[in-house]
Amino acid sequence: MRILKPDPNRSAHVALVLCGGGAKGAIEVGFYRALCELEVPIHRVIGTSVGAVNGAFIAAGTPARRLARGWAELRRRDVLQFQWSLLWRGLAAESVYTSRRLRRLLEAHLPARTFAELPIPLSVVVTDLQEGTPVAIESGDLVEAILASSAVPGLLPPVQLQDGRRYIDGALTNNMPVDLAYAKGATAVFAIVCSACARCAPRRGLGATLGQAFGIVVDCKFRLQRGEFAKRDNLCLIEEDLGMDVPALDFGHGRELMRRAYALAKPRLAAWLRAHPEVPSRFSPGSAPRPTGSAASA
């Protein structure tokens, strides 16, 4: 498998849109692997919440298999740490968990520190806590932007960015930022749905309740957007009940979610690409045979 760079001689502009969903972000990795194997070049990545995490690694050039290894090993303790000040600050505390472990994880493994270092342009969607509007961050400190985009209200603290404003999870206002992809000039958009809530009985406790409630809000908004998405012929959106049996804070199912997503996505992507030969892929007229073996798949 290899990661393809955009061909400047082609007119198509392909965007990969990655939504939120907590632990179900593993679904996006299986989807990304299928895109790579079908030789779809990515010209821009747009990510919200955990989609911003995956999007940063993809925009930095991380091979799908390497990203998959990270998700297979990921556990809740690697991402979330209890906010002990909650015990004495009570309602004055801003979150149940701190973002220290997520920050440490990103700083240890993310190949880039700023947006300017990324070989593929990235837009990270956050929510302005004061205005209640979605904002696309495309410059500055990459880790800070990701932490802001992943700051689920009540679970993780808001993040103050370089403009002095405070931001929270982008999924609250634009979990599937397909509109931003088109505004950036995309002529083909690929996305997969990661339902934020779970239909299994949620665990008891403040964190689990907040996570499930947030997921319900996000998923309800997506259902309202379906009609707009259906009007787009150049949008390949895979929507399936993948991961509905997995709570958003349960990070122990990464391997299985990636397997499900890959198995579902690859044939559907292949069918869509055959029907859209104008989109660069292994099915495009005149495309070169895919080489076997590549350092990018390591």
Image: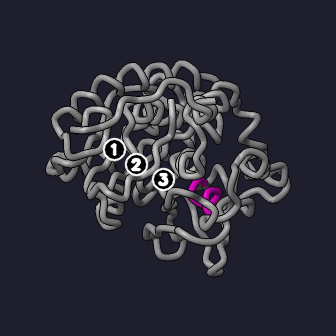
From the viewer's perspective, is the residue at label 1 or at label 3 nearer? 1
Pick the front one: 234 or 163:
234
Q: Amino acid at mark 3?
A: Gly
Residue 10, label in figure: none
Precedes in sequence: disc 2 or disc 3: 2
Q: Which residue is mark 2?
A: 16
226 is higher (above) or lower (below) than 74: below
In this image, 108 relative to 251: left or right?
A: right
Q: Which residue is mark 1?
A: 190
Pick the front one: 229 or 60:
60
Task: Report x, y in % for residue 60.
Answer: 60, 51
The local secondary structure at tag 1 comes to strand
Q: Amino acid at mark 2?
A: Leu
Look at 68% across and 59% down and name the residue there.
143
In this image, 206 relative to 246: left or right?
A: right
In this image, 154 relative to 120: left or right?
A: right
Q: Residues within 10 Å of mark 3 (few under 14, many from 20)?
A: many
283 is higher (above) or lower (below) than 164: above
Q: How many marks?
A: 3
Mark 1 touches mark 2? (CB < 8 Å):
yes
Pick the front one: 62 or 197:
62
How far apart marks 2 and 3 lie (CA) works out to 8 Å
Look at 66% across and 53% down and name the residue there.
156
From the viewer's perspective, is the residue at label 2 or at label 3 nearer? 2
Look at 40% across and 49% down and name the residue there.
17
Task: Report x, y in % for residue 238.
Answer: 31, 35
210 is higher (above) or lower (below) than 203: below
Q: Which residue is mark 3?
A: 47
How far apart marks 1 and 3 lie (CA) works out to 12 Å
